[in-house]
Every structure is written in structure tokens, then in C-alpha cells.
Amino acid sequence: GAVVSQHPSWVICKSGTSVKIECRSLDFQATTMFWYRQFPKQSLMLMATSNEGSKATYEQGVEKDKFLINHASLTLSTLTVTSAHPEDSSFYICSARGLGRRHTDTQYFGPGTRLTVL
Amino acid sequence: GQQLNQSPQSMFIQEGEDVSMNCTSSSIFNTWLWYKQDPGEGPVLLIALYKAGELTSNGRLTAQFGITRKDSFLNISASIPSDVGIYFCAGLPGRRALTFGSGTRLQVQP
């Protein structure tokens, strides 16, 4: 299957700082990338949908000024958690939907980034 | 967002047993996907289903896309300890984002 990478895999930061998470599709071009958040023992919750070259679409209840998303190319999307607080601590996972018949209707997930805010 | 009803929530079985889990929805999906997630990792795609009635296998895994397009099941035959994890169903409503089930936590006793 297609490969999606995330960096970093984990990060610990102080309250009030900003953290950037990168999501890359390694062997296909992703027209759309998605950012999810997952709390322990819960399912994945969609935060936002990111289309290359346009503004991200945020789900209800997700603050767009706090979770900045940039999808600058067909292989890279970034999520920046601004002024992070302890309640932002979570597992953040990206996924990518690709171009072309083989990848069009499937989403491939990155390995996730564990964010801990002290 | 919309949620899929996935059952059972958890299963504890003996190695070698078969496992079955399913998802239902009040809405129609064009695609059904089944993922497995290990602790601290992202979901890994197991099987993708694109047509109503489609039955697809991947090794010991078999999944079907319901005729009504509102349900899907996943079977695991002859379970082994490495099958342990959380299994999620997910539906694709056209070109929008995935809708996830709540997950089935599988534990396998050697």
C-alpha cells in the first residue's frame, strides 16, 4: 500500500509554545489530506480537511486559529498547534487520499504524532 | 460528525478461533474500509471494498460490502496472537472524509 510519513513521531513541549507536525505522502500525490485527533481508547475524530493550494476546511468545534494547516504541495501538509496547552495533548494522525484510480478512494494513514504539553 | 455503529466493542478469544465484527450505518457509503490500529501507531489499511455485495479476502481476513451499502463485516479466521489490536471500520461518503466506527478491541489468548 501507499506510504504516509509523519514527523515528529512524538514531541513534548511547554505550555504556550507552538508545535509543527509534518505529514508527507512518500510514493503518491495526495490531492487531499486529513488531520485527525485521537484520545486514549477512542476512535479517530476528524479535525480538518486540507486540499492542496487552498484553505483547509475545519470540523465544527475545531479552532482554525489554534490548529493552523498548510497544504503547500501534493506531498506535504503541516499542522501547527499554536500556543499549546495541556488539554491539546493527544495523538494526532494525518491521512492522505491520492490521485489516480489506484489511490482515489482510499485513505492511507501516517504513523501518528504523540503530543504532550507540560 | 456522523458515527458508524461498530460491534462488538471488544472481544477476548482463544488462539485459533474465528472472529467476526460488523458495522452498520443509517446512511449509504460508496466505499467501506477496514483498518487495524496497534497501540501508539496509525491505522493500517486491511481491506477496501468498492461495490455493494463485494466480498474480498486478504489472507485470513475476509470482508463484505453489504448489498444495501449501509453495512459491512470483517471476518478473521484462525486467529493468532499478532491479530491483537483495535479494528476500525470506515465509510467513505463520496468525496468527503472518512466516517469511522468506534472500534473493536481484539485480544487473543495464546
Image (cartoon, coloured by chain):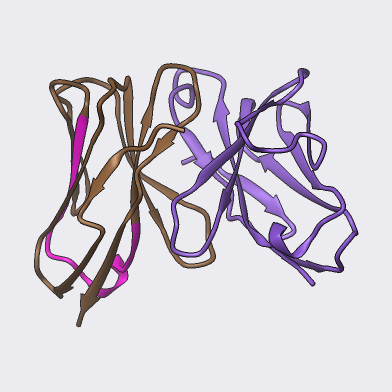
Seen at 45% across and 57% down, the residue is A42
Q: Which chain is purple?
A: A
**Is residue A88 found inside the magenta-colored segment of the image?**
no
Can residue A9 be seen here? no
Is residue A113 visible to us here? yes
Q: Residue furthest bottom?
A: B110
> Where residue B43 sits: x, y (%)?
46, 51
The quadrant of the rendering that contains the C terminus of chain A is bottom right
| Residue beneath the point at 74% across and 35% down | A76
Residue B50: x %, y % from top left: 29, 23
For residue A115, above or below residue B33 = below
The picture quadrant where one finds residue A57 is top right
- Residue B35 is left or right of residue A39, and the answer is left
Asked whether B28 or A64 is in front, the reply is: A64
Query: Would residue B78 be counted in the magenta stretch?
Result: yes
User: Looking at this view, is B74 or A64 the one in front?
Assistant: A64
Q: In the image, A58: left or right of B50?
A: right
Given the current orientation, which residue lies at the most extreme left position? Answer: B17
Magenta stretch, residue numbers: B71-86
Q: Residue A84 in the image: x percent, y percent?
A: 82, 56
